[in-house]
Image: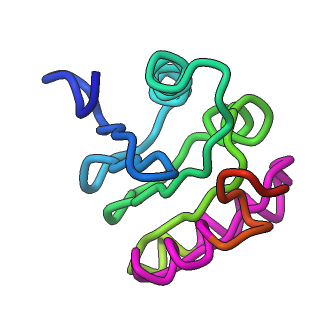
Amino acid sequence: MNGTDADSRFSLTRENGYVRVEWNEDISVTEQDALDLLDRLDQECPGVCKPMLANLNSMVTVHAPALAIFASRLNVAALAIVGPTAVDRTIATFFSEVHEPAYPTRYFTEPAAALDWLLTPGHGAPGTEG
């Protein structure tokens, strides 16, 4: 199942070598949203640790419990966070510096640069160490 359900606050799709998450615009991500993402990821890629591109889409905020879940339980090889706003950058910086996820994490303003990094050997590309 690719895409999203009508009531979901994000879409998750499998791409060539990575997973893409598109958050709905201008939302605040809750603990339940984080748990829903973990469930969807497990359905789409059971037992597989793929790199992920997450587009924040001018996200308003991410609740602390959601950040903790993403840092400790998100099964990804690497995470490229994409968002053009200062708030997006602040969320990404806070996540990587305060929550210290166990996988490589980097912020980008553009998806193309994020994919270049994400699919580079050593940053979570399939068949490499991340």
Residue at 29% over, 34% down: 9
User: Horizontally, is 110 left or right of 25 in the view?
Assistant: right
The percent position of residue 83, horizontal first and vertical second, equals 42, 72
The percent position of residue 104, horizontal first and vertical second, equals 78, 61
- Which of the 4 image quadrants contains residue 107? bottom right
Magenta segment boundaries in residue numbering = 90-119
Q: Is residue 99 magenta?
A: yes
Q: How many marks?
A: 0
The percent position of residue 85, horizontal first and vertical second, equals 40, 79
Seen as rendered, the residue at the extreme left is 6
Q: Is residue 65 magenta?
A: no
Residue at 78% over, 57% down: 128
Look at the picture and state if 2 lies above or below 22: above
User: Magenta region's main secondary structure?
Assistant: helix
User: Horizontally, is 115 left or right of 110 in the view?
Assistant: right
Look at the picture and state if 25 lies above or below 114: above
What is the image's colouring?
Answer: rainbow
Look at the picture and state if 59 lies above or below 117: above
- Which of the 4 image quadrants contains residue 31? top right
Residue at 44% over, 24% down: 44
Residue at 48% over, 72% down: 87
Which image quarter holds the N terminus?
A: top left
Which image quarter holds the C terminus?
A: bottom right
Along the viewing direction, whichever of 8 and 104 lies nearer the viewer: 104
User: Horizontally, is 110 left or right of 31 in the view?
Assistant: left
The percent position of residue 114, horizontal first and vertical second, equals 52, 75
Along the viewing direction, whichever of 2 and 63 lies nearer the viewer: 2
